[in-house]
Structures are given as C-alpha cells and as structure tokens.
Amino acid sequence: MTTTSPAATKAGGLRTGVQRFGTFLSGMIMPNIPALIAWGIITAFFIPVGWTPNDQLATLVGPIIHYLLPIIIAYTGGTIVYKTRGGVVAAIAVMGAIAGSDYLIAQVNATLPDDNQLGQIHMFIGAMIMAPLAAYTMKWLDSLWDGKIKSGFEMLVNMFSAGIWGFVMVVIGFYPVAWLVNGLMNVLSTAVNWLIETNLLPLTSILIEPAKVFFLNNAINHGVLTPLGTQQAAEDGKSILFLLEANPGPGVGLLLAFTLFGIGAARASAPGAAVIQFFGGIHEVYFPFALMKPVLILALIAGGMTGVTTNMLFGTGLIAPAAPGSIIAVLGQTFRTDYLGVILSVVLSAAVTFIISMLILRASRKKDLAKEDAFAAAVAQTEANKGKSSDALSGLAASAAGAAATGAGVTTDRRIENIVFACDAGMGSSAMGASVLRNKFKKAGVEGVTVTNQAIANLDGTADLVITQQQLTDRAQAQSPNSIHVSVDNFMNSPKYEEVVEMVREQRDSGA
C-alpha cells in the first residue's frame, strides 16, 4: 500500500466554488426539512382542498411558512457561521426582511384593484442572504474588541453589541434586502411560470441532471427550487418544482441498466445501489456509475425530461419538498389527487433512462470488457506460462482490481482513532458509508475507533482520517488539511474500506 499524504491540495475552480456554495445552502435547509414536512402535512389535511378541511387548524399554514420557516433557516445558517450568537443575530435580522417585504407588497396592493392583489413573498431566500451576512459581520465585530474588554464587563458588552448589531441588521433587512429579494422572487417566478406556460419546463433537466452527478445540485435545489416550490405550494397547495430534482426514476433506471448489462464490479454493486437509491433516497450512489461513462448523463437527462413532461401533462405536484429523494418520501408528499401522475412520472422516467442506458452499455460492451479484463487476462497467462499459481501474481491481480476502482492504497504512521465520512449535507451517503465501515470494524474485532459522519463544511480538523467521494475530496482537504484523506467511488461498497480496516488492525497489533 502507498501513503496518502495529509497535505491539502488547494481547492479551486468554478465547480468547487458552486459545490461549496450549494453545501452552505444545504446546511441551512436540510436540518429544517422536518419543519417543511410538518407544514406540508398541515397543509395537506387542513386547507380547504385538503384531506380533512379545518378552518381553525388551517390558520397554522400562513404563520409557519411566513415566519417560522424563514426564522429557523436563518438561525441555522447563523449557527453554521458563528454558533448560537450568530444564529440569534441572524434570526433577528431576517425579521427585517420579512417585515420589509410585507410593507412593500402592502404599498403596491394599495394601488391595485381587489381582484389583482399581490400575495405574500416568503423570505426563504431572504433568510439565506441575511444569515451569513449577519453572522459573519457579528463575528468580525467581536474580533475587533476581543481581549480588550475590562474584566467584569464582558457580559454587558456581549449582550449589547449583539442587540445593537441585530437592530442594524433588521434595518438592512427591511430596506435593501427586502427590495432585492422581492425583485428576485418576481423574476424567478416569472421565469418559471413562462417555462410552464410554454411547456419548456422539461428543459430544466438539461441543467439539473448533470448538476446532480457533479454534486452541484444543492445550489439549484435549495437556492431556487425549494423557495419557489414552497411559494407555489402556499398558493396552490402543491408544486411541480419539488419533483424536478427529487424524482428517483432516472437514477434507478440507470442502476437497473447496469444490473442487467453492466460488467465487473459495477454490475455486482448496482442492485444494492438501486435499492438504496430508490427506497433510501440517497441519489449519490448512482453518481459514480454515470461518471465512469459520462455519455450516460444523456440517458439521465432524457429520463428527467420524461418525468417532468409527465407531471406537466397530469398537472401533478408535491405539497412539500421530498427529502431525501426516496419513492417513499415522494409518495408521502404527493398531493391527494396526484398519485397516478406522480407514479407514472417515476416509472416512465426510469424506463426511458433504462432503455437509453442499455443501448449505450451494449454498444460499448466489447470495449469495456477489454478494459476490464485485459490485465487480469495477462496475469492469468503469466501464471499459465509459469505452470503454477503465484501468490505474488494473485496479489498483483487483486491490487490491480482495487486500483482500477479506487486508486492508490492507504497507509500512514499516524494512529487512527477518529474517522469521519463527509458529504455535502452530512446526512445521506456519508451516514450510509459510516455504518458500513463501523460494521466492518466490528466484524474484524477492531476497537478504539470512532466512525462518524458530517457535512464537509463542519469538518474542524480533528479527524485523523476523512473519507469522501472523489468529486468532494478537494474541498474536504481544504477544510481539514491535517487529516489523512481517502477518496472512494461509492460509499456503499469500496475496496478502500478493507484497506482502512487492515491498516488500523496492523496499528493495534503493533501497539502503535
């Protein structure tokens, strides 16, 4: 095995920047998805067109979406930047954006007839702007007088400085930010409505499907689709926008194609990945399959467009975001009259992706087989020429198979006690990978190792070893430069796990 250097490589480029931006947005939205789901359930049951209309309980719908959700999103974003202090100032600040937006709309409505009144704009995007702005500036201000406050006055200064700066940020939220967000939401809503009216919404799959594969989807999903979809759901009871990215059909179609027509390790791991992707909602498990043959992204685009077209034809939508993107979550959030259209959109998108992927895989099968088996065949021929099997040659064949899948091996003189799986949100694929590795340590009888999962943005440099998917390793190295970093193709099943377990076992056996 070779040494994986703990030194960080400088992350850069547009892709990494968009990933980092999307991760921050995801960090604000994902922990609050339960609140969105709760709001969706309340909406589904109690609004006039719900399952069990209730005028009294329906009064919860407006305050939750207009006040509670933006405030907790802002608080979460502020805590990411500057812990509780940043969260409190961010929550104060977003109230300025909420009140400012309401004031602007009231001023406009005063000039419009009653049948043409504007509705409220919910400050999801305002929260995403105000949270980092308020928290970062509060953190900067605190740094100005850090260590300069006389003993006994620390609490006084801390309380009043946060209160005064919260007041300043409320005013900033009320005027420039509220104006900006109202204008931005109007532009985005107009653009989406135009795409729907002109039947061009399926074209969004040309952007969304490749973005998912390269881990750029969070910026689109949480930055645009979730705020706009929630706005639509508040007005119409449902939104098609929640289905643009969450539809599990294209991913499962690709994995089924690999199950039947793939080769080697990809074919062997595809069935398990399909179950996890479709029922568990962890879409990341199919990304490596698309990346190993990028032309397959065309199949994903075609499947995505099919799903969107089907939902447009049936007028279907979800009442709230489906997170994770599991068929269970999708059906759980489906509007009460829309099950047929939603199910068809998943089935048809999977079928289209499967058929196109099948054609691509079959057309390149001979070429792929040659690449897959060339080295193994050479080793077998060498053993035949030698007249007997060889441990060295067998090990060479095994190491070649591992290298083809994951790159170089892993070893280090550093004692490994704390292993962290890191992904964008720190919840889905990283949680699955951590569970797999914990089980491997348990079966191997290795103790004294902690295996956890978290978002890349939350890496604090204390991990001895960080495991990420290959597309995310640069960012993890920049966030935790002193850790050992291991890249894998697939969190579900990687030869790297065996190498890590063996390395830690050898350290324990040697007393390191």
Image (spheres, rainbow, N blue to C red):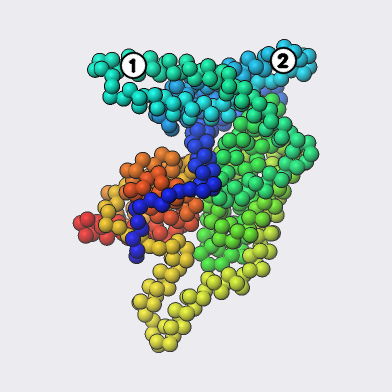
Q: Does the rendering let one see residue 508?
A: yes
Q: Residue shown at 57%/36% (left/top)?
A: 222
Badge nearest the viewer, 1 or 2? 1
Residue 220 in percent (x, y) is at 60, 40
For this view, does 377 lie left or right of residue 146?
Answer: right
Query: What residue is pinned by disc 2?
Result: 109
Classify residue 145 by image quadrant. Answer: top left
Nearer to us in this view, 168 or 307: 168
Q: Amino acid at mark 1?
A: Val
Q: Secondary structure at mark 2?
A: helix
Q: Amino acid at mark 2?
A: Asn
Q: Residues within 10 Å of mark 2 (few under 14, many from 20)?
A: some
Q: Does the rendering let one see residue 41?
A: no
Mark 1 and mark 2 lie on one chain; the one further toward the N terminus is 2
Q: Quadrant of the N terminus?
A: bottom left
The numbered disc on residue 337 is: none
Q: Quadrant of the C terminus?
A: bottom left
Q: Residue shown at 58%/57% (left/top)?
A: 290
Q: Secondary structure at mark 1?
A: helix
Q: Residue shown at 65%/53% (left/top)?
A: 300
